[in-house]
């Protein structure tokens, strides 16, 4: 595959889900046996045109470390920001 046709993704996942009022942020809610963020990373990481994924995670996120992401070698972590736009910018700056 031509390297010009490969992409990187930035996934802003630093939210706390305060408006949803769930026990955990919505990216960590279970859906068919996995968290929403695990489904997202699985799909993006397995796509043939995606070279890697940068996930923006809140500095105080206690749930991220509990995920088993050892099978992914193309996921990188950036610090999330105060708003989604800051998280995306942090992810882009990491790239």
Image (cartoon, rainbow, N blue to C red):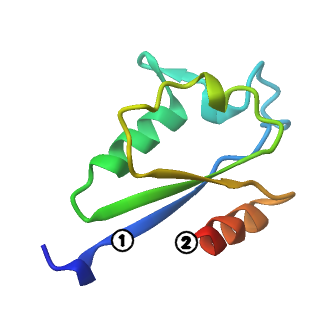
Residue plotted at (48% across, 25% down): 68
Q: Residue furthest bottom?
A: 4
Q: Secondary structure at mark 1?
A: strand
Q: Position of residue 18 (x, y in %)?
A: 85, 36
Count neighbours of disc 2 (C-alpha within 10 A) and say few if under 14, some if 14 to 19, many if 20 or more. some
Residue plotted at (64% across, 32% down): 64
Q: Which mark is residue 95?
A: 2
Residue plotted at (61% across, 72% down): 92
Q: Tell me which corner region of the image, top left, top right, bottom left or bottom right, holds residue 72.
A: top left
Q: Which residue matches tag 1?
A: 7
Direction from residue 1 to residue 41 in the image, left or right: right
Direction from residue 9 to residue 5 in the image, left or right: left
Q: Position of residue 58 (x, y in %)?
A: 77, 45
The tag earlier along the polypeptide, 1 or 2, is 1
Residue plotted at (69% across, 26% down): 63
Count neighbours of disc 1 (C-alpha within 10 A) and say few if under 14, some if 14 to 19, many if 20 or more. few
Direction from residue 62 to residue 74 in the image, left or right: left
Relative to 77, does residue 29 appear above or below in the rendering?
Answer: above
Q: Tell me which corner region of the image, top left, top right, bottom left or bottom right, holds residue 95.
A: bottom right
Q: Position of residue 4 (x, y in %)?
A: 26, 84
Q: Which mark is residue 62?
A: none
């Amino acid at each position: 595959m031509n390297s010009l046709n490969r992409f990187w993704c930035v996934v802003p996942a630093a939210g706390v889900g305060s408006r949803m009022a769930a026990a955990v942020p919505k990216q960590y809610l279970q859906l068919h046996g996995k968290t929403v963020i695990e489904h997202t990373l699985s799909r993006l990481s397995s796509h043939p045109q995606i070279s890697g994924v940068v996930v923006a995670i809140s500095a105080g996120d206690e749930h991220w470390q509990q995920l088993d992401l050892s099978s992914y070698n193309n996921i990188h972590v950036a610090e999330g920001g105060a708003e989604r736009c800051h998280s995306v910018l942090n992810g882009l700056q990491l790239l």
